[in-house]
Amino acid sequence: MDPLIGQALGHYRIEAKLGEGGMGVVYRAFDTHLDRPVAIKILRADATTSPERQRRFVQEAKAASALNHPNIIHIYDISSSGDVDFIAMEFVAGKTLHQLIGKNDLPLKDTLKYSVQIADALARAHSAGIVHRDLKPANIIVDEDGRVKLLDFGLAKLTEKTVDSEAATATMTAEDALLTEEGSIVGTVAYMSPEQAEGRKVDARSDIFSFGSVLYEMVTGRRPFEGATKMSTISAILQKEPPPPSGLAPNLPAELEKIILRCLRDDSASGKRSLASKGSDQAPARDSDSVKTAKPEEPPALVRKLFGSAGLKPYRLWEILHIKICLRNVLLVYLAWRFKNVTSGTWSLALFFAILFFGTIQSIMAAVLLFAGSMDREFLRSEARKFAPWLRAFGLANGALAISIAVWTAEGHTILAALIAFLGVAIGVTALTLKPVMDRAAIYNSNR
């Protein structure tokens, strides 16, 4: 029996052993202060040997605890009792993804359900500048409701070799990695990115590679890179392409296979040969150079001047433009109603109803395009081509009617006339110039 069971670490009472890995031993414990179950990870004795590594560990764990994401295990406490360093974290009753996969693949619906949550957690951490460095099925737990929780976020950085004040610069080489036991926080060999295997500095792309390895195993039941020894596994990661997952899972959707292979191909970061460079007829290799160096597509100069933001994607500006079309028409109808009330005669009534008709039709068309944009890009293109001439015609008609009303009321109602004239010009200019420019930038020439 484990001697720690029944003992106390601070205000945590150890109840049962949950598992053991390269970083330490995990126990289920009870927080006597808050009366709740927790998971306690007791660190290996050599995990925080130097003050600098301990400082970096605490800093990294604090950053990970601040993520506060539903798919990331929350860290409650970092402490020590005697000479034992430990982490107290959220306890989740469930199974690891490694246990769920077993020797078989997962059902497609479960794969999609879990992978979306994993990707969401990674995106949140990466946006905060935190890289996992040891993403693998054993570090992903699924609770009884199917909710995914990622373990050990940010803690893998603990074993990176750093420059201490009394030590020379050191980097982890492939040979160093081989000396690390399976499951250590440096990175499990089978899920290691090429950068980790070569001892390079890692970033978010390393997690994406590991995510691709996890996805591959979820759909095939096999790891993408396997060898008889750790060295041969690392060699496969650096030099070979994994067998296409569709060869092992014939019913795998083509789009999901593309996502998996795209995650596992990163030519410029690792020097790994792509399928394309080997002349294979398999799925196209990841165009990582263009992915990493491409800048966000900027809207045309006219769009930037009118909206004042080149940082927004053209499609977002296009959406804003169509919302503005609807709002301007509503305002113009209101002002036309005010015009009808301050004037008299058949013509004022006719102008009001004409603006009401043209504005309503134009707003409905703009709303239809917004809806089409939320459905499918090709559907949006077809609808935009269909409505483009009508939107232009109704916009110009509305603008002309507004100018006519402004001229009519200019003498007796200057402010009302100025507002109507301004709206008329804005609606006309949008229909004649800005709308076509935005369509080209956001629909026809952009990836949104």
Image (cartoon, rainbow, N blue to C red):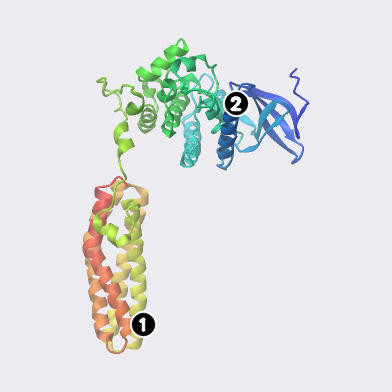
Name the disc covering residue 50, or none.
Answer: 2
Give x and y (percent) for residue 372.
34, 53
Give amino acid for label 2: Ser
Residue 12 percent across, percent down from the top left: 74, 33
Give the numbered dot on residue 165: none
Q: Farthest front residue?
A: 166
Q: Amino acid at mark 1?
A: Arg
Instruction: From the viewer's side, name the closer residue of 9 and 362.
Output: 9
Residue 257 coordinates in the image, percent (x, y)? 37, 29
Whether residue 398 is visible to the viewer of this picture, yes or no, is: no
Q: Tell me the quadrant of the picture where the N terminus can be found.
A: top right
Front residue of 394/311: it is 311
- Disc 2 packing (10 Å; few <14; some 14–19; many ≥20): few
The label shown at residue 338 is 1
| Separation of marks 2 and 1 at Cα, in angstroms | 77 Å
Q: Are marks 2 and 1 in contact (CB under 8 Å)?
A: no
Give the x, y percent position of residue 65.
59, 39
Say above or below: 351 vs 79: below
**For discs 2 and 1, the disc positioned in front in the rendered view:** 2
The tally of labels here is 2
Q: Is residue 385 above or below residue 252?
A: below
Q: Quadrant of residue 91?
A: top right
The foreground one among 177 and 417 is 177
Disc 2 secondary structure class: loop
Residue 304 seen by the camera? yes
Secondary element type, mark 1: helix
**Residue occupying image coordinates x 58% and y 21%:** 22
Above/below status of 176 relative to 439: above
Q: Residue furthest top?
A: 228
User: What is the crowding at mark 1: few (fewer than 14 residues within 10 Å), some, or many (at least 20)?
Assistant: few
Work out whether mark 2 precedes mark 1 in sequence or the reverse, and give the earlier one.
2
